[in-house]
Image (tube, rainbow, N blue to C red):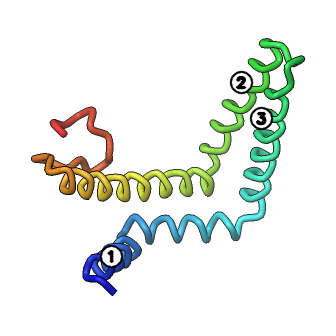
Amino acid sequence: MSMYIEKAKELGELILKSEQSKLLSEASATFKSNEEAVAKMDEFNKYRENVRISMQNPNVSKEEIDILTKKITEMTIELKQDEVIGALVFAENEFNGFVNQIMGVLKDTITGNPKKEQCSSGDCSGCSC
């Protein structure tokens, strides 16, 4: 196996050992063991799928679509307020931001355009990235 593949595996293993990965793993386990949170998420996913199917129907009015999407927004807010689901969403966002930051460093290095400063959150709105 090439050195590059080995280094990629090492990086993957380091990512799995990160605090962000551990937080995500713990939040995911907590979520999966909470029947109420799982049921809420299942209900949301079913509703969202029904909305997707409804939006493909050319006979659905703009007003009906607005009502459906407003309910999705309300359900999303409610889900994020659930302690278990909110913790999972937070952990997913932290992990994804962490991985995106690493991918950005790889891309910048490969393209020969390394940045002076790397964002810790993946959100460059407050820095010079």
Across and down, in percent, residue 22 comes to: 44, 71
State whether residue 120 is above or below residue 64: below
Residue at the image position 65 percent from the left and 63 percent from the top: 31
Q: Position of residue 53 (x, y in %)?
A: 83, 35
Kind of residue at disc 2: Lys
Seen from this angle, which residue lies furthest left? Answer: 116
Cα distance between the residues tagged 2 and 3:
13 Å
Q: Which mark is residue 14?
A: 1
Which label sits in the foreground, 1 or 2? 1
Q: Which residue is mark 3?
A: 52
Precedes in sequence: disc 2 or disc 3: 3
Label 1 and label 2: CA atoms lie apart by 41 Å
Q: Earlier in the sequence, mark 1 or mark 2?
A: 1
Farthest residue in the bottom direction? 1
Horizontal side, residue 48 vs residue 123: left or right: right
Between residues 15 and 26, which one lies in front from this camera angle?
Answer: 15
Q: Secondary structure at mark 2?
A: helix
Q: Nearer the N terminus, badge 3 or badge 1?
A: 1
Q: Nearer the viewer, residue 99 or 76?
A: 99
For the point 35% across and 57% down, the residue is: 98
